[in-house]
Structure formats: structure tokens, C-alpha cells
Image (cartoon, rainbow, N blue to C red):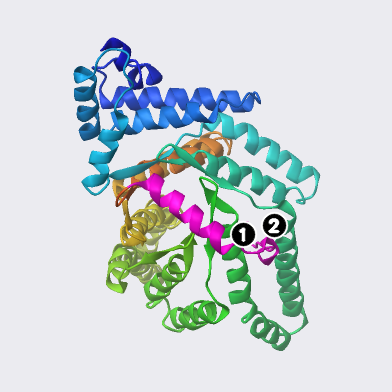
Amino acid sequence: MQALAANYYAQLGVGQTATVDEIKAAYAERLAAFRDMLARREPPPAEALDALREAFKTLSNPQARVAYDAALDAAPPLAPPPAEPAAAAQSASGGGEEGFEFVGDGGEYFRIWIVNIFLSIVTLGIYSAWAKVRREQYFHRNLLLDGSGFDYHGKPTAILKGRVIALLLVGGLSAAQHVSPLAYGVALLCLVPLVPWLAVKAFRFRAFNTSYRGLRFSFHGTYGQAFKVFVGYGLLAMVTFGLAFPVFYRQLRKFMLDNTRFGTTAFACSVTTGAIYRIFLFPAFIVLALFAAMIVVAAMSAGGGTNALAAAGFVFLLIPLFLILPQAVLVPYVAARSSNAVWSATALGPHRFASRLPVGGFIGLTVANWLGILCTLGLFIPWARVRVARYRAAHLSLAVAGSLDDFVAGEAGAATALGDEAADMFDLDIGL
């Protein structure tokens, strides 16, 4: 039995009585060792990572682990571990929930970040396109699902092209503003139909250049759909002074997700307008309360005397609230709740996502990150980004119907049969 137990338990370097937390910690250490080997340009055998992933998948699942341990006790010495029966039992029960995991390190990303900033400055911003590719590759490759990382394949020249176009458009708009109000208005009207086109190009670029286990994503939204979302619902949000913004936000998220595919399988987002409106109720209440306080302060100031002094005291209290409250509380509040609402209502074929991001915990993380950034004059930014990525990933999962391996293999086969779309169709990115 000891020889058999050495299969999965020894691969992770833990005993057969190890807790789930100890197994997770051991798995993270083994992944870190693999990353170090890659950094030294000594890639480990592909089967070694697959074996480690299979060991973690089995031992971190209570039902699969019980079945595996029972098979170890019943098997003769030196016999191969019966991993397939446990996996088959899991598949027969309808699959399980695979959690996302971000294994990046703040210190490791700091070295990439500081070099990116330095080279972007000395090249007057030209290197920023290459900097984005390095950043995206780092965060994609360190985001794991079922032990396998994502990847980013974007070309810096395509990103640079998009930024040049964006710079020319902004420069032209600024120049028109200095000519006359009429010229500025005409320039804005000319820019309106370009926004949906640029958005579609950017979404296609990002999707096509993102992959998981060698299989790329794709985006199939049309210009007409983008025009309806960005111009139609965008203008609706403006003319209603923000009251229709949740409608615009929902349509934007559905446009992005419903038109995205992994291989040949499409995402589907069923989030409701009511769910989005409920998210924005609390921020709207806070903003209205702050505006009401401003009106009271203005009225007290107009009265003069003692009222003016009291108003001045209120001003000193309101200014920090206006500067800090939105960034420290309202933004992470909306980000956490909207992430939970959208992803928990999203499916990839038969597989469903689940986002359980704690709102209070995410607000606390944001406040701690801001304090770290302020106290270090910005040097804490890489650690803050890694902390956010790790926290988000830890609370996002995919409820798999059947076998994720079989699903990816099937999609890879279907994509190969249909043929890849030409990469030169996705040669523009306006994202920063």
C-alpha cells in the first residue's frame, strides 16, 4: 500500500493524512517549482505537470479522494493507482466544480512592471505596446483552471497600431475644440459611428489572442449590434442622466459574452436588468446623500455668521468623502456585486460559472491596496494587482457537466475540422 500511496501523495509531497489546505499548499509549491524551471529555460516534461494536476484534482476532491484511498487499500502492492474509476465515478455523477486559481507573485510581477515603466518612458511610450503584451502574458499564464493556464498571443505591433489610431482621433477632436464649437460638434458626430467599429475590432483581437489548453477564443459580434449598444443604449443612459445606465451596462456585458466562443461553443449570459439595477441602488443612495449634504452646506453658507462657520466645518468633512468614498467603497462594491451577478448568470454550453466574491472582503482588499500604494508612493501597485487577481480567481469557479478534458478535446477537434479564422482579421487593439 505504501508504494501505491506514493503515486498521488508523493507527487504532492504530502502524507496520506494531509488536510485539504496542506494539499493546496503543496500543489502551489510544486507549481512554483515548475515556474522556476521555466524561468531558467529548463522546461519540465509535459507529463510531469499533467501528473501533478491529476494528483491535485483527485486529492482535493473529497469524494474522489475517498474512492482513491479505498482503491489503494484494496490494490496489491506496486499496482498502478486506479485513478480512472474515481474519475469515472465523478463524471457519472455529473462532473464537479473546478475552481480558478491565480498563482502569480507580487515580487515576480514587480520586476516586469518596473522594466515596462522604464522602457516606456525612455521610448516616449512606444514600448507600452510591448509592455502590455508582457503584462497580459503574465496574468493569463498564471491564471489556472483545472491546473492548466491560459495564454495571450497578442502582437505588440497590432496594439501599437490601435493606439496610434486612438491618439489621432483624440488629437483631431482636441484640435476641433480649439477651432470652434461647431467644428467640435461635427468632429464628435463623425466619431460616433467609429466607436462601435473600434470596439468590435478590440473585442475580436482580445478573444482571438486568448487561449486555454491551446484552443483559442473568438468573438462574433457585429457592427450593427455594437452600434445599438454603444450609440443606442449609450445615448439613452446620457439623456436620462444616468437612470438608464444599468440598462446600458447589462446590454454591454451581454453583447461581449453572448458573442464570445471557446472553440465552437458560445457563452450565454442571462443576467436580468433588475439584478443590475439592484446593484446600483446603494451607490445611487450614497451619491444622493452627498449631494443633499452639499445643498445643506450651500444653504448654511448663504446664511452667514455662525452658519457659515459650521458650513466650513462640513466642507472639510465632505471633501475627503467625495475623494475617497467612491474609489475605496463604491467602485469595489459595484465591481464585486456586478461580477457575481454577471458570471453567476453565464454559461459555456452545458457548463455554468459561479462567482462568490465577498463584497466586504473585496472592499477591504481595495482599501488595503490603496493604503499600500499611497504609503509606498506607487511601488506597491504590482502587489496590489496580483492580490486582486488572486482574490477574484479564488472566488470564481466553473461547474463542469461531465469531463472538462473531454469537452476541451472535443472543441479542439471541432475547431480543427472547421479551420482557424485568418489572424490578420484581428490586427487592431485600442485597449490600454
Q: Position of residue 38 (x, y in %)?
A: 60, 28
Tell me, yes or no, whether the highlighted magenta stretch contains residue 407.
yes
Determine the residue located farthest toward the right in the rendered image.
Answer: 123
Tell me, yes or no, whether the highlighted magenta stretch contains residue 126.
no
Give the left or right position of residue 384, taking residue 431 as reference: left
Q: Residues within 10 Å of mark 1 (few under 14, many from 20)?
A: some
Mark 2 or 1, nearer chain start: 2
**Magenta segment range?**
403-432
Mark 1 secondary-structure assignment: loop
Give the left or right position of residue 64, taking residue 149 as reference: left
Q: Residues within 10 Å of mark 2 (few under 14, many from 20)?
A: many
Mark 2 secondary-structure assignment: helix
Q: Amino acid at mark 2?
A: Ile
Nearer to us in this view, 235 or 320: 235
Task: Identify the residue shown where x is 29% and y is 27%.
Answer: 82
- Judged by its main secondary structure, the magenta piece is helix
Q: Position of residue 309 (x, y in %)?
A: 39, 59
Nearer to us in this view, 425 or 346: 425
Tell me: residue 262, above or below residue 396: below
Tell me: residue 105, above or below residue 131: above
Tell me: residue 65, above or below residue 217: above
Nearer to us in this view, 355 or 2: 2
Question: Disc 2 vs disc 1: Cβ atoms closer than 8 Å?
Answer: yes
Residue on which disc 1 sits: 431
Q: Position of residue 74 (x, y in %)?
A: 19, 19
The C terminus lies in quadrant: bottom right
Tell me: residue 24, above or below residue 393: above
Circle number at residue 159 = 2
Task: Identify the residue shown where x is 29% and y is 45%.
Answer: 97
